[in-house]
Amino acid sequence: MKRVAKPVFFIVAILIIALAVTSVFGVTTQHGDILTTRIKGVSDIRWGIDIKGGVEATFQPADGVTATEEQLEAAKSVIETRMVSNNITDYELYADQSANKIIVRFPWKEETTNYDPYEAIEEISATATLTFRPGNSYENTSYADDGSAVMTTPTGETAATVLLDGSNVKNAQAGVITDNGKTQYIVSLEFDDVGAKLFEQATTDYLNGTISIWMDDTLISYPTVRNVISDGKAQISGDFTAEEATALATKINAGALPFSLETVNAGSISPTLGANSLYAMGLAAVIALIIIAFFMIIVFRLPGFVAVIALLGQLSITIVAVSGYFPVFNSFTMTLPGIAGMILSIGMGVDANIITAERIKEELRNGKSVDSAINAGTKNSLSAIIDGNMTVIIVAVILILVFGPFNMLSFIFGLSTTGSIYAFGYTLLVGVISNFIMGIAAARLMLKSISGFKLMRNPKLYGGAKNEK
Amino acid sequence: MKNKVIDFYGKRKVFFGISMGLILIGIICNIIFGVTLDIQFSGGSMISYTYNGTIDENELKNLVQETTPNDQVSFSISKNLAGNNDQGEGYYFTIQFPGTAAIDAEVQSEISQALEAKFPDNNFEVSEFTSVDATMGAKFFVKCIAAVLLASILMVIYVTIRFKKIGGMSAGVMGLVALLHDMIIVYFVFVVFRMSIDSNFIAVILMILGYSLNDTIVIYDRVRENKAKMGPKAALVDVYNLSMMQCIRRTIFTSITTLVAISSVYVVCLVYNITSIQSFALPMMFGVVSGCYSSICIATPLWVLWQLKKKEKVGEV
């Protein structure tokens, strides 16, 4: 057998534990008064309405417009798309045709402190029209909470001319660049063919002049044009935080509402389940983990022990995929059923290890040495594990494509997303991938490495010799 | 234990009988109890009240539950920021009634009267009456079915290609039969326990969709391997029984760990009285058991049956 070096076991185990600790507790740095989240932990997850409560709002077309049934549906689906692409997957959305209104309920954003429903509604109902205008003359200046100036309402030529707008953007994405050693969050834009031509024209006309970029009525940046840009790509930098950049990219991508909406009323909803429900689910997870750990170690001994470490790693990857881990990524919304699904995956996650361990036992029973039994066992069990998981991958990918923002079957069913099912497919896929990384790759590395120790070479530790009759 | 091989295939009639029996019980319960749809699927109406001051939420919910003939109403309470007065903070209290039939005025006034009688100091007033469309209506159901079909077709194609040597197509189709079996069992759990079909139902069905076939494929994998080892002369039933024997510990162990996980959720939610998760965990527990049972007792024996029938036709027994 190709031996794996002895220290590998400890390295992998330490990495897994480090991942587990950071993904649960997060990492923050204190710089003067400003607490910055570097890595998001469990407390930075956006919890569903059932756990933390949320916002309820009723929207109506503004200015007394009566929307047609199709328009109301269209508005509903834009709101839905915005929420899903913001990773808000736990929501209720009702359209009332007869009363000409849309009712929406969605959970508070993670780390909300002031619980102001009107502010929260901004996230989904803002019209968010992006425009590129010549010059940068504006009318008003006000100051944001952090002291930075906010310029609003274009004037003069800036108000009169729109060079191009958000509808010419094919794709917007938040990103990060390092400028003179300073980290800056940006939104990079990719224009469609028309947009690329317009942008080329604009950068030709205003070469060495200023083009300002506006979000609705607010000036977000006014770069000086240094070159003619003809490849249809642009970047917006405007002192964004990670969250702001992500939010802006999402708004541009989600498109505009067919009519502007006004908020008829808004209020906060108390959590539908008691505050202790989160504690209860945590308890259930710990109980499940402990029982499964005992079960695995008693039944499978050493491979069982390795499986438990791998399981921790698998669970951490799932948490990472939900919270986003890095602040640039939006947290997924986690509801109680979502947590229940995660706990279920603890039980299913050890499957790969069970298949392998059973196989090693069998090879030992056939009279093989520990080394060759581990070798044959891991090799022979791989096809079963891969084939078994492939069907899960098929299901997960289909659910993501059909119910997520990709809208695969939209030519039959029209544009409609369903957040809860999209989220389900996402966690399912993450579960399988983390299973491949931890339950198979990491677990095998650890097993092959730890079996290099003399003490760990007794077949009994693999459940072998005892069963021999 | 090494040499003893149980004749799984020989017991197939017992297995099929058990499943048929369960499904029959389910159908009978379905006819007697019927099935209720949640407001998300059926659409329905909502009545909102405003009130002031603090009220015990459970007391409020119990009162409304007693007053309405419909046993599937749900509630939510939200703060009414504009409604604070000297009697305390303002709240909205919304009752949701599933079903396309509008709530008749009689029920509405009964609830209003009951609320006023029980909480005279809290200023209950009807603020809004809304009828909503189903957010997950017929179109959503059709879309779900389309997605399930698409996934099923892809899974059968995958199994057909990967298990070509053991009659892949039939293996895939029988896997689907087992899958269907598990979904039906889960549906009947909702019917028998009188739980309304809501988003939990969709969640459990999707979970089963991913979980059920996994077990079956691990068994097929063993059959494929043993068939290659034992050569073409070995009788199919022997190959199958041996493979089953080798896989059964794994199948049962994985089901046990999965069952442990979901049961601990169920028990904790029972203790903490979190009903909305109980209605996810309970059907899921049945789904896990059914998934284990169907791959051992339904999918693979059916596949053997199919293969034998095929050989009979060709003339080689």
Image (spheres, rainbow, N blue to C red):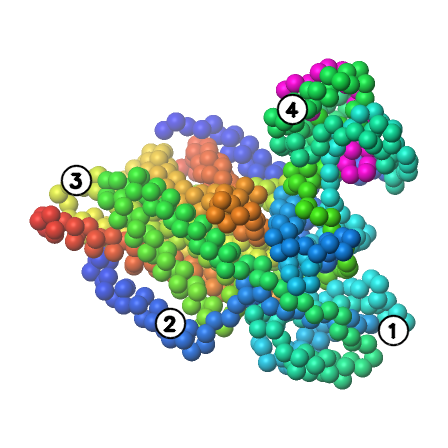
**Residue at (46% x, 74% y) in the render:** B34
Above or below for A468 versus B47: above
Determine whether, in the image, residue A125 is placed left or right of residue A387. right
Residue A436 is situated, as x and y percent measured from the top left of the image, at 46, 39
The three-letter amino acid code for the residue at tag 1 is Gln
- Judged from the image, the secondary structure of the residue bearing numbered disc 3 is loop
Q: What's the CA distance linking mark 3 and mark 1?
A: 85 Å
Q: What segment carries the magenta color?
A: A213-234
Give me the chain letter of mark 4: A
The residue type indicated by label 4 comes to Ala
Q: Which mark is residue A454?
A: none
- What residue is pinned by disc 4? A196
Q: Pick whichever of labels 3 and 1 is earlier in the sequence.
A: 1
Residue at the extreme left of the image, as rendered: B315
Q: Residues within 10 Å of mark 1 (few under 14, many from 20)?
A: few
| Image point (23%, 44%), residue name | B167
Instruction: Tell me if mark 2 has few (under 14), some (14-19) or many (20+) residues whose alpha carbon lies within 10 angstroms of its own.
Output: some
